[in-house]
Amino acid sequence: MSGETATGEGSTETLDRARSLLWRYRVPVGLVLVVLLLRPVISHPLLLGYEAIAATILIWMVFVAAFNLLFGYAGLLSFGHAMFLGFGMYAAAIGVSGRAGAPELPFPVAAAIGIAVAATVGYLLGRLTVEKGEIYFAFLTLAVAQAVEFTANRNPLNLTGGSNGVTQNVLPSWVESTRGQLVVVLGGLEVDWYWFVSVVFLVAMLALWQIVRSPFGRSLVAIRENDDLARAMGIDTKRYKVQAFTVSAAFSALAGSVLMVDRYGASQETLSVITSGDTVLMAVLGGVRYFFGPIAGVFVWQFAEEFLNDFEVLHLGVTSVDLSGVLTHWHFFLGALFVVIVVVAPLEGIWGYLRDWARGLYARLKGVAE
Amino acid sequence: MSTTELTREDLATVSPGWWAVAVLTVVLLALAFAVEPGLFIDQAIGGLVYGMVLVLVTLGLSLILGLMGIVNFAHGAFFMLGAYLSYSVVVTLGLPFWAALILAPLVVGVVGVVLEMTVLRYLYGSDPIVSLLATFGLTMMIEEVIRAYWGTAPLEISRPAVLTRGTDLGVTTVPTYRLFLVGVAVVTILAVYLLISRTDFGLTVRAGVQDGEMTEFVGVNLPVRFTAMFFLGAALAGFAGVLYSAETGMRTTMGETFVILAFVVVVVGGVGSLFGSVVSGILIGVSAYLTPVVLTALAEVTNQPWLALQIRDLVPYLVMILILLYRPRGLFGEEGFLE
């Protein structure tokens, strides 16, 4: 068959090959598109009208994607993932600022320490909890995260700054803040902060994508689908789960260290249960079964948060319709939406619906064309 | 399912290591008592109060989890709702505290029933993780309603005059309210136990958990009984909320704090055991209050001031991690439950 087409319709074959290549590398292409489109889209006057939030959204995407490696792929619901974000954030902030007698470290070293700490905690906690079943795992991660938050709040050795967090001298020397905008200065070359975050985003997301589609990632899916069967096939399920937890923790800490620069410091709120809950919400909202699910979830969530907060401040019009009373309570409506999604289709999320919708549209267009 | 059997059958044989730990604990407690008897008794009762509140919250959670397989994250929100409702009853309506003690749990129970009938009913038999997520969404909604209606500032109510006086215990004087709270909690826990183990209602619910179809064949209206169980669980959380908030006031973070603590209590006591929840609730409450006292006493005796760590909030989690390391199933847990 292929011989016939090659002689008769060479151009169709090139087109097909291009299409299959595009399909095969749809994730990297999609990630690049996210980076290129995110900032122009949200800074459109009809949407947010400002672009400062774009870098933050990218960082959150990395974090929630790391969380979803554990939840969506390995089937382990961590309800305390904020602590890993926090490890990266606090290690970077403490290291760069060199507070309370801690040695002043370059940002990459401090971030690496944070990532190492997060990975170690993830590994040990995983060893302890991963085989205890989903519900146990969720409680235990939640409880340990709560313990970490209390510890940070106690300001041990004057390192974490208690409820104030670490906010003094936290910017690395190569990041400059001019009129509220972050600029990366590398050897005379000035790069916008957004592009620096984009590089981190692309590298981290591609790494996660490689992990997800590697034999390791496939094994995780097998474990998620049927633990006993996976074990019968010779997969050391505990080891795989612990490794997934470790990797997820490390990537979360990476996101945390970049978020520290983005937010000018480490804050206590980041460690709270609320952040952990938001992480779960964003992932489920987007769709945990898909690589792009968390990305969609973060976008929708962060966008809604910024958009609605902005709305409240603006008090649209001369009559000044005060919507702030309703909109400050947008969590209520988001909670309702979340409940509906969970009850109707807990694993699909927004991305799942978009996919189905796009498939349906494609099928209909094809039908019309034929 | 022995969520309902308050037996001690599962106690492990006590090894020498555990004996050593027990002796060391007794020695440390005796030392702390010797250094400052008044403070010790004060904190022990404070811990008992805290533990009893924990037990009441956990009991509802455990009932719903053990009998219906629903992981109710919204339980902390029920607790918080009970507390804030008592504020409305006492301050806004001007009714006495006793009215709040009855009205607030009833309203919370009704809220629980509404949620059960509109959302949770569709989740019976599905993956527990789904119920955890759904109730997490419900928590967000309830907490947002509380913030919208009562605001975010901490509130408090005054206790009834009879209970504001102190009771002299020889070494120290404790507020009568604390003793009242412990007494009420003990009575409530006993009542719940009798309801589940000795009444027809408890029997049919337990039967329904074992074999729902068969139970319905013999003429039991199960959905109604499950809804009633949910009412009971939510009302217990609301009741605990009223009791606790009269002691320390209402805060918007109390819901999340207590739901996490309740889960810690469940894990330490062993998922699936009501008796375990009672024991571990009291254990965690008392140890959280006594650990700082013991550490302070140690610091004083050994002249090492750094030992006096204020780690009260951390103790429940430390207890949990220790228990998990040495007895992963929890103190009285059954093998294979929710694993």
Image (cartoon, helix red, strand yellow):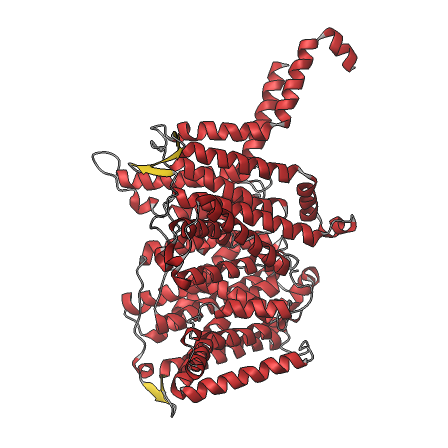
Which quarter shows the C terminus of chain A? top right
Of B131 and A274, nearer the camera is A274
Say above or below: A9 vs A273.
above
Most distant residue in the bottom direction: B170
Of A171 and B117, nearer the camera is A171
Most distant residue in the top direction: A8
- Res B119 visible: no
Residue at 21% from the left image edge and 36% from the top image edge: A319
Q: Position of residue B196 (x, y in %)?
A: 59, 73
Q: Position of residue A311 (x, y in %)?
A: 31, 38
Say above or below: B14 vs A354.
below
Residue A40 lies left or right of residue A129; in this view the side is left
Residue at 60% from the left image edge and 51% from the top image edge: A245
Say above or below: B301 vs A343.
below
Say above or below: B118 vs B82.
above
Of B267 and B22, nearer the camera is B22
Q: Position of residue A78 (x, y in %)?
A: 55, 53
